[in-house]
Image (cartoon, rainbow, N blue to C red):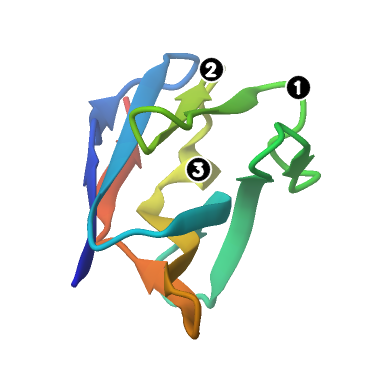
Amino acid sequence: QVQLVESGGGLVQPGGSLRLSCAASGNIFTIYTMGWYRRAPGKERDLVATITSTGGTNYADSVKGRFTISRDNSKKTVSLQMNSLKPEDTAVYYCNGDIRTSPYARRQYWGQGTQVTVSS
C-alpha cells in the first residue's frame, strides 16, 4: 500500500503565500516524477507543476514565476511554494506520484487533496 498525504492548505488573502507538502509512505521501491495538480470548482483537474527524480521541473503557464516545486528524495516528500496568490488559484490541490512498488508494478498514486482558498 502506498499513501500520499498532503498538508498546508488553507485560506489566504490575495498576494499572500502558502506552502503545500506531500509525504509518500508505504511499500515504495522507486518514486519517479512527482507533481501537484488542482481542480477548481466546476473545472477539470489540471497540472500545476511536476518534478522528476533528478530535479527537472515543469510548470503550468498560469503559475510560472509564482510557484516553486521541490522534492526531498531521502524523505520521499514533494513541496509546492505558492507566492503572489490570486483568487483564481483557489482549488483543491492534489499530490501525485509515479511510483514503483515492485520490479513488476508501477502506477500513478494520488493524495486526498487539500483546499486552497484565496480570498479577501
Marks 2 and 1, how far apart at CA: 9 Å
- Camera-nearest label, 2 or 3: 2
The first of marks 3 and 1 along the sequence is 1
The tag earlier along the polypeptide, 2 or 3, is: 2
Quadrant position of the C terminus in the picture: top left
Q: Amino acid at mark 3?
A: Asp
Count of all numbered marks drawn on residues in the image: 3
| Mark 2 secondary-structure assignment | loop
Q: Is residue 73 above or below residue 98?
A: above
- Sequence-earlier tag: 2 or 1: 1
What residue is rendered at 30% in x and 24% in y?
A: 12
For mark 3, what is the residue? 89
The amino acid type, in three-letter code, at marker 2 is: Asn
| Residue behind mark 1 | 65
Q: Local crowd at mark 3 within 10 Å, few (<14), some, or many (≥20)?
A: many
Question: Could you tell me which residue is drawn at 61 percent across and 27 percent down?
Answer: 67
The residues tagged by marks 2 and 3 sit, at their Cα atoms, a distance apart of 11 Å
Q: Is residue 108 above or below residue 29?
A: below
Rendered location of residue 116, percent (x, y): 31, 42
Marks 2,3: beta carbons within 8 A: no
**Which residue is tagged 2?**
83
